[in-house]
Each structure stands twice: as C-alpha cells, then as structure tokens.
C-alpha cells in the first residue's frame, strides 16, 4: 500500500540484492530503510571493431546489461563522441564488470566508470546527504523521492541526528587502552557510560545494548578506524556476540587499507578506514581537517559535494571539489573520463618560460612598519576562474567571443559557461554569504562558530580547486587553464600595486593574493576604502581589507640578514589581535614551551598602543625571557611542554642521515611500534646518543637526561626572532641572556633611529 | 606537483653558484662586496620572474645596478644636505 512522508536522507548505497538502499530519517523520528531499482551506466569509446567486440563480450556475461549506441559530449573534444552505452541493471555489479571489460579492452576509452555511487544517485534525483525530501513508497520500495531543499540554502532544516561518541582513554599506538567512554550527546561533556575493555563479553553485551537503545545516526569515535572498530569486530566474532555497529544488519563493515601519499610538499598518512552501512562512522583522528572545520564542516562538505558523510570526512577537499565537478558533468550529460588522456599542448620555450610561473611573491621591505593595511583578494583563484570563465574546455578554444590571457596570449572562450566556473559559482556565493552573516552576528552568538566552520569547509574546497585544475590526472584538469589562472592572478596583483602607488601609497609586500600597503596619513578603514574601490574597479575581482596593522615586522632570512623572506612576519592589528607567519610559534614542530614564550612576548608587545613606544617594553621582554630560561634550567618546565612533534617524511631505511624524528622513530621501532611516512613522532632532546628520547617509549623519560642547552638555544632563537625588529641581534641577545651582559643604554630610551631597523612611522 | 622549469629562486641560486670559482679567487674583502651585489639582486626576484627573460642573469645584473643607483641617489641626497647645511 502506498505511503508518503517527509524526512532527511541519511545514507544511500548500492546493494547486491536490493539495487539501491536508502536510509531516511522520518520527520516523526523513525529511521526507515527503503530500496529501489537503480540501473547505472558506463560508456566506452574507440574503434568500431573494438566496440563490437566489447558488445559481444558483454552480452555473454552473466551480469544483466542493456546496450546501446549513443552520441555524447566529451569535454575535451569539439565533436560529440560515439560511445557504447552499457546500462547495468544491478548497480553493485558494475565495478566487477567494468574491471573485466577494461582488462580485456585496454585500448578503449571508458567514461563514467568509477564514480562514487552517491554521485550517480545525486545526478538523477538531486539528492545529497541530509537532504530534506518528500518520499512516496510502496511498502519497503521507494517509488519517488523529491528533494525539498538545496545544498546552497543558508539555513536548511537540519535533522535531529542522534550521535554516539565512543572515546578510548589512550592512543592504542602508544599504550593499550583500558576503557571506553560513551557520550550520547555532544553538547554534554559528561559521559553517559564508561565500559572497561576487559572482560570482553560484558563489554560486547553492554555496547550492543547501548547501540540498540540509542540507534545512532552517527558514530563519532577516537581511533575507531585504526583500532577500535576492527578490535570490537574481532571480539564480536571470537565471542560470537553480535554487535550492531552497522544499522543495516545485512551488511558487514567495509574496510579500506592505510596509505601514505605526497601532497603539496608534505607526506600525508591516512590510517586504515572502517566504514558502516545505514549510519555514518567518523574517526576524529583519521578524518581530514576535522580540527579545522569539525562535524559542522564535514556535514556541510557532504551536502555540497553529494559524497557520503563518512567518505567526505576521510578524503581530501580535492576529492570533494572533484565530486562537485563530476556532478555538474553528469547532470549536463558530459562524459566523465575514467583515465584522462589529454596531453599538454606543445609550446615554445619562451611560452613555457612565461607560462610556467606561480603567483607573484615579492621580497618585502624588511623592518618594522606602522599603520599598514593588509588587503586580500577574496578567494582569488576561484574568483578568477569564475570571472574569466576558466575551465579546461574554454581555455585555448577559439570562438567569436574570446578574451586573451594577459602575458600568455592564450584565448578563453566566453560564449558559454565552463564546467569549472559553473561548479564554483554557487560555492563562491555561499561562502561570501556565510562570511557576511558571520560578520553581522555578535561575538557571543553560537551561530558564529557554526558559520565559520562551514565557511572554512568551503575555503578548502575552493583552495584545492585551483590545484586540481593543473593536476594532470584530475578528470577536469588542464595545465593551460591552471597557467591562465596564475597569469590573471599576477596581473590582478600588479594592477592592485599600481592602484596603490597611483594613490601615493608604499607597497611593502605582495604575496600571491594579498598586498601590504601604507597610504600616507591613512590609519582607518575608511581611509583605505578608496584604494579598495579602485582595485576592485581595475581588476573586476572581489577584494577585502583583512585589517590595519598597528605595526607589522617583516623579517629577513636567518641565514643572510640582507635577504628578505616572503612569508616570515608578525604584527598587531588595531584591535590588538596578533598575526604571525613563518615564525617558531606557528611551526608544528616547535615545543609548546618555546611557542608559548614567543606568544607571551608578542602579547606583551601587543599591549603597546603606539609603535614608537615598542622599545619601552624591551626590559619586560628580556625579563620574560630570563624568567623562562631560569625555569628551564631549574627543570621547572613540565616535560610535555618540551615535546617536539615532527612528521616522518620517508621510511626509516630511506634516511641517509637520520633526522632527530627518524632517530626517535627508530627507538620506537625497536620496541615494536612502527610509524609510517606522514605520521608524527614525538620526542624530547636528550643528552648522549642518539640525542633524542621518543615520548611514546614504554619507559617514561628521565628528566635528568634533558638536553637543556639545546632547549636554551631554541629559546634564544625564538626570542631573537621577536626582538630583531627592535634592533636586537641574536648575538646581542645571547650576551644578554647567557653571558649576563647589561644593556647598552638605559631601557626604554633606546634612540629610535639606531635601534629600530628600517622603522617606517 | 612538479615544475618543468626551475623557479626564479632556483635560477638565481644556480647563477650565483656558477660564479663560485670566480668568488673563490677574489680577495676576502672583494668576496663580501660580491655577496652584497647578489643580495641586492635577490630583492627583485619577483620582478625577474615576471619578466620571464630567457637569460635571467641579465635581469639580475640590472637589479644589482638598480640597487647601486639607489645607493648613489641616497648618498647624493646626503651630500647635498650636508652642502646646504655648510653653505
């Protein structure tokens, strides 16, 4: 008998028996499992004889398929492509059938072959995770689904999700956990249950009861991927006590192997993954950027990318933006290549010289500068793609309506909107809308944090979109499009520089999408507004004032004091907030004690209202440093504050000269704890060989073995970084701190012209 | 994330390295002067990159000259100030 209801889509996946399974949260609170027939399609193109052979092969297979010849659009071809359309009636059987076809017919080009199932479903029904839908059913069979909201809604009706948090009392990589803490709401920090991990049978019985009673939509765990869920599953099998980790009891847990990969100059490690059916599982410590955008950001990413919640939590934002592009393509009937085969177009050496450049990065004017505005292009590269219609199919395409890329002379077709700009436009609009809403809310409003987390998730999507445009293996990447974006970026930044100079300003620094400018006599937001308007007029791109610094210090290279470094600076905005880049306090491998000292110095400097009074706080800063040094030498600094945390960049046997991190990892390995490239190793600097002591060794470190001189040196360097713009060199500070030398002149009356290097008041 | 061409910073360091033998044969005092010239050129790497000259060292030489000329202008200003003061 037919039935209708409204509710939220929790999960959708293919099923060997039921076609597609959908889990829905009815508005009345019930969780419903429905199924539906949902054939899926892949395509093959190539020589007619090969296609005929593929046809014959497919009809002989036991998998039920419908075959057809069609003309479809390949983004990289001007003319439509003739393809063999393979419609697989049972979606779960597609991957195996396709792999066999690809193995037997390696010369054919395949399309729409390896797409995430949620994207295929989203392309047809406009669904996305947590979409608010109207559903009609016939018993357990879904008849129709209509989505009532959009991923671009600012405040969509959100489902009352039931979250169950499972937290271990220690990191299993370092020590055997003993207890499982369970919370039933994230808002309440008090645990609802504490279950000892041993004995095992009561643990399983109790946990099964809790899972059955609360029936969570989302399992939020610590080390759930890498240890907890596999461990529980093994126990459940051994003790023969079923554990309903899945909501769909017809399915087992899905696993994906651990891997390390290289991305943006860093080695990243993703642990083994354990995925559930009918509910989502997120491991806080195996989720991408969870510390940055939290659960709110993950849900937002899932909504806009249409990837499942647990997939999007574990993959890089690049996968998210790629999914969005695939969705745009699927909805417009554009073929999604399995393996892209486009090579870079030939160019002359001179063309390559002009094109193969990144963003413009200046060498800043080293020294201390007052009343400096930091002006940023808002989401510069995505805005350029959207504004100039940069997409793989529009770049280099001659049409009656083209524009030329500055410096490169490549033409960009403006006649019809490109796939990448179409994908980006709603995202850019929503990010700006979220930022405006956040700015309008008072500081105490809890929605501020939520909006910020959502905006942060968008930021990562937008950032990676540019990288993917130039990535040769990206399905919709084309290096010429990537080069066009950076060329427009350099042009926009130079136009901004010229605008500032035309208004009489001094450009202190340019960095890809931002500029640091000092206009004569300007010190307020309204003083800088004419410049912002002028830049926006000249470039056509959105621009914003990040803030006005009370003062900012650009630092030189540590190796050569005459050479400026583009991304090493610190400053204080007019509202007293600090901004720093490239200094010790920002580095992930700085011990907390050193970072806290540097921050304390900066906070002291931030209390000074006028830049001219900065030398006056020198005695305080030195006093602070001396105090910290004394605490260190008297061993009053807690050991955890001295822990250095560094990532392994390669396997241990690949180090020619082992770094301190590698030596610490070797210590761990000798006790049976192995670490992979991309994983962090924590250690203390210690006396004697090998100079380090791994923090996670079974025997706690002996405080007497600390290499105090090394830590004192780190403290000195961190202090010197901050004092350098006040005219105090590292050598002078060394004398002051270690050799107990006095000041050259009375504190607080240091002459401005000699002590403040390059001060621009 | 590979680059087909060396970045301007890499090109600069290669050019500097190619003068290592020249530098070694200089007197210590002259070595320091040469280092100053290269440090001066380093300040204009962004412009050198944007220029995309097929012989980047020509751009670096121009950058060294620019910094030298800036110094000349600065000193000229100082001398004129002193003369005004005396006169």
Image (tube, grey):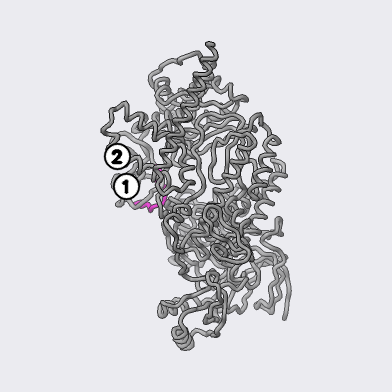
Q: Is residue A727 above or below residue B6?
A: above
Image quarter hosting the C terminus of chain A: top right
Q: Which residue is mark 1?
A: A666
Give the image location of residue A13, x and y in percent.
57, 71
Identified at 72% across, 44% down, the residue is A441
Q: Which residue is mark 2?
A: A690
Q: CA distance from mark 2 to mark 1?
A: 10 Å
Whether residue A281 appears in this view of the structure is no
Q: Toward the viewer: A422 or A8?
A: A422
Magenta segment includes A342: no
Label 2 residue SS: loop
Q: Is residue A80 above or below residue B76?
A: below
Magenta segment includes A681: yes
Give the image location of residue A252, x and y in percent.
50, 69
Disc 2 crowd, CA 10 A, few/some/many (<14, 14-19, 20+): few
What range of the chain is rendered magenta? Answer: A669-682
Give the image location of residue A712, x and y in percent.
40, 29
Tell me: A356 left or right of A702: right
Label 1 residue SS: helix
Q: Chain of mark 2?
A: A
């Amino acid at each position: 008998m037919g039935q209708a209801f409204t509710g939220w889509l929790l999960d959708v996946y293919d099923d060997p028996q039921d076609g597609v399974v959908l889990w829905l949260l009815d508005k009345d609170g019930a969780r419903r499992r429905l199924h539906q027939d949902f054939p899926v399609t892949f395509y093959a193109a190539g020589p007619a004889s090969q296609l005929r052979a593929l046809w014959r092969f497919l009809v002989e297979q036991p998998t039920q398929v419908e075959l057809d010849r069609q003309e479809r659009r390949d983004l990289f071809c001007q003319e439509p492509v003739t393809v063999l359309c393979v419609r697989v009636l049972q979606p779960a059987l597609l991957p195996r059938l396709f792999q066999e076809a690809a193995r037997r017919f390696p010369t054919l080009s395949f399309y729409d072959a390896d797409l995430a199932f949620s994207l295929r479903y989203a392309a047809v029904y406009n669904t996305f995770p947590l979409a608010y839908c109207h559903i009609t059913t016939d018993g357990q069979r879904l008849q129709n689904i209509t989505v009532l909201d959009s991923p671009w809604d600012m405040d969509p009706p959100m489902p009352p999700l039931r979250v169950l948090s499972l937290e271990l009392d220690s990191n299993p990589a370092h020590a055997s956990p003993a207890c499982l803490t369970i919370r039933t709401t994230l808002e309440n920090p008090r645990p609802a249950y504490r279950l000892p991990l041993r004995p095992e049978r009561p643990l399983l019985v109790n946990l099964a009861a809790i899972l059955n009673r609360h029936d969570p939509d989302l399992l939020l765990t610590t080390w759930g991927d890498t240890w907890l869920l596999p461990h529980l599953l093994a126990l459940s099998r051994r003790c023969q006590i079923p554990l309903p980790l899945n909501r769909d009891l017809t399915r087992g847990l899905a696993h994906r192997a651990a891997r390390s990969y290289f991305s943006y100059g860093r080695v990243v490690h993703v642990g083994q993954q354990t995925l559930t059916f009918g509910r989502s599982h997120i491991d806080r410590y195996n989720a991408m950027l969870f510390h940055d955008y939290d659960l709110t950001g993950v849900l937002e990413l899932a909504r806009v990318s249409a990837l499942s919640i647990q997939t999007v939590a574990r993959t890089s934002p690049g996968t998210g933006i790629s999914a969005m592009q695939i969705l745009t393509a699927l909805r417009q009937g554009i073929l999604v290549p399995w393996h892209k085969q486009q090579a870079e177009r030939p160019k002359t050496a001179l063309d390559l010289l002009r094109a193969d450049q990144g963003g413009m990065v200046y060498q800043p004017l080293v020294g201390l500068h007052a009343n400096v505005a930091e002006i940023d292009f808002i989401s510069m590269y995505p805005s350029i793609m959207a504004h100039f219609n940069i997409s793989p199919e529009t770049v280099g395409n001659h049409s009656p309506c083209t524009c030329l890329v500055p410096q490169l002379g490549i033409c960009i077709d403006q006649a019809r909107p490109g796939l990448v700009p179409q994908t980006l436009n709603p995202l850019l609009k929503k990010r700006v809308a979220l930022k405006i809403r956040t700015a309008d809310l008072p500081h105490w409003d809890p929605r501020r944090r939520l909006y910020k987390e959502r905006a942060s998730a968008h930021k990562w999507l937008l950032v990676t979109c540019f990288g993917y445009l130039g990535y040769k293996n990206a399905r919709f990447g084309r290096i010429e499009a990537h080069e066009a974006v950076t060329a427009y970026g350099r042009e926009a930044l130079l136009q901004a520089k010229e605008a500032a100079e035309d208004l009489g300003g001094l450009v202190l620094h340019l960095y890809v999408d931002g500029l640091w400018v000092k206009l004569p006599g300007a010190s307020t937001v309204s003083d800088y507004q004419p410049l912002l308007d002028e830049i926006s007029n000249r470039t056509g791109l959105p621009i914003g004032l990040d803030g006005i610094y009370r003062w900012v210090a650009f630092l030189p290279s540590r190796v050569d004091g005459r050479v400026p470094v583009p991304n090493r600076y610190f400053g204080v905005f007019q509202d007293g907030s600090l901004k720093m880049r490239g200094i010790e306090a920002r580095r992930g491998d700085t011990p907390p004690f050193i970072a806290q000292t540097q921050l304390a110095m900066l906070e002291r400097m931030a209390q000074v209202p006028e830049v001219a009074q900065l030398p006056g706080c020198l005695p305080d800063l030195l006093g602070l440093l001396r105090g910290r040094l004394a605490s260190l030498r008297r061993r009053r600094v807690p050991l955890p504050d001295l822990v250095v945390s560094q990532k392994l960049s390669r396997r241990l046997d690949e180090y020619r000269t082992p770094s301190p991190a590698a030596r610490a990892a070797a210590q761990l390995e000798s006790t049976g704890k192995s670490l992979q490239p991309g994983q962090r190793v924590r250690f203390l600097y210690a006396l004697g060989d090998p100079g380090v002591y791994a923090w996670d060794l079974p025997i706690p470190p002996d405080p007497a073995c600390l290499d105090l001189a090394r830590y004192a040196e780190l403290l000195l360097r961190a202090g010197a970084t901050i004092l350098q713009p006040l005219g105090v060199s590292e050598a002078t500070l060394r004398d002051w701190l270690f050799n107990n030398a006095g000041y050259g002149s009375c504190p607080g009356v240091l002459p401005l012209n000699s002590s403040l290097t390059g001060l621009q008041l | 994330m590979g680059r087909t061409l060396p970045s301007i910073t890499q090109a600069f360091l290669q050019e500097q390295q190619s003068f290592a033998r020249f530098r070694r044969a200089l007197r210590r005092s002259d070595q320091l002067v040469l280092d100053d010239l290269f440090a001066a050129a380093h300040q204009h790497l962004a412009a050198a990159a944007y220029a995309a000259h097929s012989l980047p060292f020509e751009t670096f030489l121009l950058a060294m000259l620019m910094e030298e000329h800036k110094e000349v202008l600065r000193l000229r200003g100082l001398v004129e100030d002193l003369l005004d003061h005396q006169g």
